[in-house]
Image (cartoon, grey):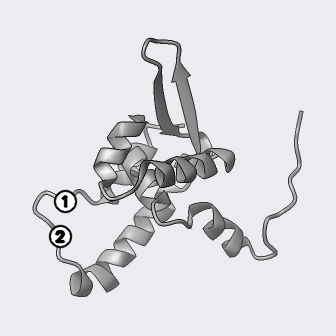
Amino acid sequence: MVIELEPRMNCPLDAAMSVIEGRWKSTILCLLAVNGSMRFNRLLDNIGCVSPGILTKQLRELEKDGIIVRSVYAEVPTRVEYDLTEMGWTLAPLLKSMSEWGLKYIFKNKVIFDEGIILPVSIDNKVQQRP
């Protein structure tokens, strides 16, 4: 069964940006691209300054848009993991390009990185391993 959805915007760029906009969505996507599937608390710990409610909201929106998949395992306690879908992995080159742009034009003048920070510049290596 094929479900045809109405376009969300009349501009393809706006439609794409509406999927990844949100304070924590790009961070979530980069974490999943670099680390693979992650549990909620691991995402929460890695992001650090997001509330559980906001993280849940952003994860639900990404899931609704088909960018991530939420897998629930019948264990006690219940285990829930998040991972990029095939469509989510198609965003990896875009995220890499945006990261490179940020490094080139913004970060070198505006942000001081802590030691050991991991940037999502290795995403393209992971894409080749994914669907």
In percent of the image, x 71 and y 68: which residue is there? 15
Residue 78 position, x and y percent, is 47, 19
Q: What element carries label 2?
A: loop
- Residue receiving disc 2: 113
Quarter of image, res 106: bottom left
What amino acid type is highlighted by mark number 1?
A: Ile
Whether 113 is drawn above or below 82: the answer is: below
The secondary element bearing badge 1 is classed as: loop
> Which residue is identified by label 1?
117
Residue 10 appears in which quarter of the rendering? bottom right
- Left or right, 119 with respect to 7, comes to left
Q: In which quarter of the image is the N terminus?
A: top right
Give residue 112's quadrant in the image: bottom left
Can residue 34 be seen by looking at this rendering?
A: no
Q: Residue 56, labelled with which disc?
A: none
- Count of numbered tags: 2
Q: Is residue 47 above or below residue 108?
A: above
Residue 51 visible in the picture = yes
